[in-house]
Image: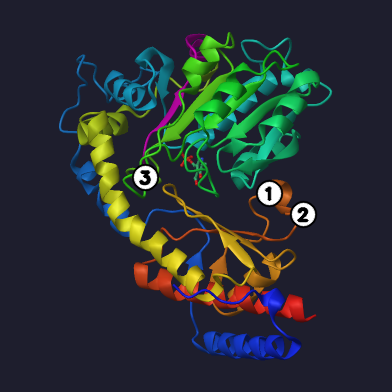
Amino acid sequence: MTTHAPLADLTDDELTRFLQDRQAAYDRLRGEGLKLDLTRGKPAPEQLDLSDALLGLPTSTKDRAGTDVRNYGGLEGLPQLREIFAELLGTSPSQVIVGGNSSLSMMQTTIVNFLLHGGVDSPRRWVEEEKVRFICPVPGYDRHFSLVASFGIELVTVDMHADGPDMAAVEALVKDDPTIRGIWIVPTYSNPTGAVVSQEIAARLAAMPTAAPDFTIFWDNAYAFHHLTEDEAKSADILSLTAASGHPNRAIVFASTSKITYAGSGVAVLATSEANIAWYLKHLSMASIGPDKVNQLRHAEFFGSAQGVRDHMAKHREILAPKFAAVDAALTDELAGRGVAEWSHPTGGYFVNLDVLDGTASRVVQLAKEAGIALTPAGASFPHGQDPRDRNIRLAPSFPGLDEVRTAMAGVATCVALAAAEKVAA
Ligand code: PLP
């Protein structure tokens, strides 16, 4: 591994040479006429191919209990699939609803229900509150933030650390302020940092006193089974922790097979207390007479069991792990030791979090764009797209082929070095 000298230690002459050198490398990069995209965490076509057996399923029109899956009914989801997800999420089938193809939709429905009906523990509907605020650990998932912001819910940021949100900040916010009604948590291999919420932090979230009686943890376990190494993170059991702390309705768990089978045609899952399940189903019954059970049955047949899901995820890992290694290698090669960038080394999930020199993230994204490499807009992982330090970039290496990831990331590393040199030399 090459380790370079910190940029800050270079003499003026060395810095000028470095800048000229990077400018020349960047001009060559622009001349290559690249067209590469590292913006969205989508599965690659080869990952989708892994699930193509779905296209020949289900083999039956009836589920295990003899229910005709082609007909109406079964709002809570197919029993076979509820069992599989209950085992995977460490809860009981009665605490699981299997829905349509998007967990984000289930999150939005949940928020709308809080707004228009109030939750099980709400004193009144959220629309009747003067103000509703959500805690957003940053960097985090942009769609979580924009989803609640679209309803006028205010966003309050706290820092996301490697083991979860800054709990001192969270506890101070929720303790006396009843306007704080929820927190977004991606507990396992978080988007974008790859952080895994520790058992201790999960226990503090479950037990902390909150001024709002209906304070809710939106525990979005989108990447629970998406390991990149053999060191498989185990998600904290938030439902047992909240129940044991006397707040049984505090947590709602979401997950989906979007990055397990087909991103557009998978199944989504919600798990929570039985009281919350009844609340959710009551309101859902106004909108639907039952989910797409044909899709649910083909997933149940495809997986066979919870172990079937785990085995399937090992095949994704084989495709994804080399791409993440390529990201790390390109960044290390160009930037290690220069003191101008830090990046995550995720052991699962879909993203690498890149922090560049303060004030240069937008410049890096612009340079990359002009060289034909599309990156997620700088600041995308912050509420309203505003990164106060303009240093954060989310890299999503899953979709392009391995060679494309190598080429794109060598280019990104050049852009990071050039933007840093421009800044330091200025
Ligand atoms: N939650 C997180 C943290 C995600 O990163 C994503 C997609 O990138 C989703 C949810 C979307 O899930 P779904 O496809 O089930 O709506």
- CA distance separating discs 3 and 1: 25 Å
Contact, CB < 8 Å: mark 1 with mark 2?
yes
Above or below — where is 381 with respect to 9? above
Residue type, mark 2 in image: Pro
Q: CA distance from mark 1 to mark 2?
A: 9 Å
Q: Amino acid at mark 3?
A: His
Instruction: Indicate the colouring scheme.
Output: rainbow
Can you identify the residue that label 1 sits on? 382
Pointer 1 or 2: first along the chain: 1
Residue 276 part of the magenta-drawn span? yes
Can you tell me whether the CB of the residue at mark 3 lies under 8 Å from the nearest atom of ligand 1? no
User: What label does residue 288 carry, if any?
Assistant: none
Disc number placed over residue 388 in the picture, else none: 2
* Ligand 1 is within 8 Å of the C-beta of the residue at disc 2: no
SS under mark 2: loop
Region of the chain picked out in magenta, as a range: 265-282
Dot 3 or dot 1: first in sequence order is: 3
Q: Which residue in the protein does label 3 denote?
A: 227
Q: Position of residue 294 (x, y in %)?
A: 28, 30
